Image: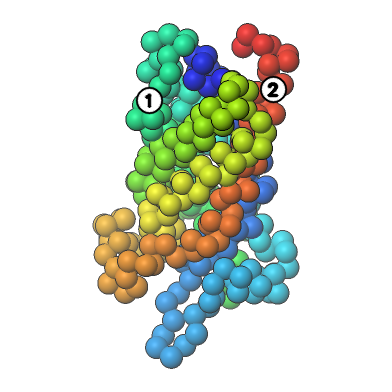
């Protein structure tokens, strides 16, 4: 993406690169995503009882002890199947958001315009991301519980959700996903473009090294979660709750969390998120750069 602001954005190219980058992200970051969801959704301990997990490393230790290393990858089929179109739509949406603001090929966007384009990408990706996250969270939480297994994988989970509540059940938590992704995606792409721009300024070249790309990608992931973590906690609570538990959706989830656990609960699981964010998003942009370089060799004018 070293020439992202010197050439007019190409949504199709970004669609392909984003899809491959998404696969790299899931493979790298899913274990810590599992820990994050389990920390976010663990039951509140009764007075005098110890919590199910005392933190990120305790959750990882207990997961590996009880389920083996495969337990850290529980629920990965849903995001892995969905991640290609999700990231493809996300990066295509970002490219399209930039393109409509570019009057000509040499137009350099302001960071406000980049934020708007990034937020637009969240709008498109939610179409696929919301049901994928719903299924992923249910499978991750189910594996951590000691009760009977309700779902036997991604497809079985999707079928049962549809049977129980139709398409609305599958898309439960969509508004919370939007509430997370619109501002967080904006911060994500602004951070990436800013670090890339600074790298170009320091080197005096339009070419950006892979090290700078990895730094920009990893830092953008951290920026995303600083902005999006509170909405993500509410989304996880909402998507794993029994039908009718939160009568007014995300509003009820927020009121319940504030009443029972306080504001700090909005950042529960943040350590797992931050440990995961840098390498996962660095891997994403590494994958995208590989695709871009392949295009530059095969079809330089694409």
Query: Secondary structure under badge 2?
Result: helix
Residue 225 vs residue 50, the one in the foreground: 225
> Where is the N terminus found, in terms of image quarters?
top right
How busy is the neighbourhood of tag 1: few (under 14 within 10 Å), some, or many (20 plus)? few
Q: Which residue in the protein does label 1 denote?
A: 110
| 178 left or right, relative to 295 | left
Give the image quarter of residue 57.
bottom right
Q: Residue at x 32, y 66 (%)?
A: 263
Q: Residue at x 32, y 74 (%)?
A: 260
Q: Are marks 1 and 2 in contact (CB under 8 Å)?
A: no
Q: Which residue in the protein does label 2 denote?
A: 293
How far apart are the alpha carbons under marks 1 and 2? 26 Å
- The numbered mark, 1 or 2, whose residue comes first in the sequence reads 1
| 177 left or right, relative to 208 | left
Q: Residue furthest bottom?
A: 48
| 4 left or right, relative to 169 | right
How busy is the neighbourhood of tag 2: few (under 14 within 10 Å), some, or many (20 plus)? few
> Where is the C terminus found, in terms of image quarters?
top right
Colouring method of the image: rainbow
Give the image quarter of residue 64.
bottom right
Q: Is residue 49 above or below residue 174?
A: below
Give the total number of marks visible in the rendering. 2
Q: Is residue 165 visible?
A: no
Residue 297 position, x and y percent, is: 73, 15
Residue 43 position, x and y percent, is: 45, 74
The mark found on residue 154 in the picture is none
Query: Secondary structure under badge 1?
Result: loop
Foreground: disc 1 or disc 2: 1
Q: Is residue 135 above or below residue 127?
A: below
Residue 287 position, x and y percent, is: 67, 34
Q: Residue at x 53, y 22 (%)?
A: 4
Residue 298 position, x and y percent, is: 73, 14
């Amino acid at each position: 993406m070293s020439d992202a602001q010197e050439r007019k954005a190409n949504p199709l190219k970004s669609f392909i690169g984003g899809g491959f980058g998404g696969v790299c992200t899931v493979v790298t970051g899913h274990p810590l995503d599992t820990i994050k969801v389990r920390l976010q959704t663990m039951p509140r301990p009764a007075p005098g009882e110890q919590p199910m997990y005392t933190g990120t490393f305790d959750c990882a230790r207990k997961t590996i002890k009880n389920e083996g290393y495969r337990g850290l990858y529980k629920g990965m089929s849903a995001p892995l199947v969905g991640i290609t179109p999700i990231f493809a739509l996300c990066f295509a949406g970002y490219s399209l958001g930039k393109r409509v603001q570019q009057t000509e090929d040499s137009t350099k966007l302001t960071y406000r315009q980049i934020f708007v384009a990034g937020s637009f990408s969240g709008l498109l990706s939610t179409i696929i991301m919301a049901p994928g996250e719903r299924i992923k969270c249910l499978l991750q939480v189910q594996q951590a519980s000691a009760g009977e297994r309700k779902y036997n994988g991604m497809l079985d989970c999707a079928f049962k959700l549809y049977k129980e509540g139709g398409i609305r059940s599958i898309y439960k938590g969509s508004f919370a996903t939007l509430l997370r992704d619109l501002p967080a995606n904006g911060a994500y792409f602004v951070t990436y473009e800013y670090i890339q721009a600074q790298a170009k300024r320091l080197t005096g070249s339009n070419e950006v090294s892979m090290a700078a790309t990895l730094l920009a990608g990893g830092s953008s992931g951290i920026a995303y979660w600083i902005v999006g973590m509170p909405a993500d906690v509410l989304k996880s609570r909402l998507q794993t709750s029994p039908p009718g538990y939160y009568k007014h959706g995300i509003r009820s989830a927020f009121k319940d969390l504030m009443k029972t656990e306080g504001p700090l609960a909005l950042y529960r699981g943040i350590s797992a998120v931050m440990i995961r964010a840098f390498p996962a998003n660095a891997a994403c942009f590494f994958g995208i750069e590989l695709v871009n370089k392949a295009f530059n060799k095969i079809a330089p004018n694409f």
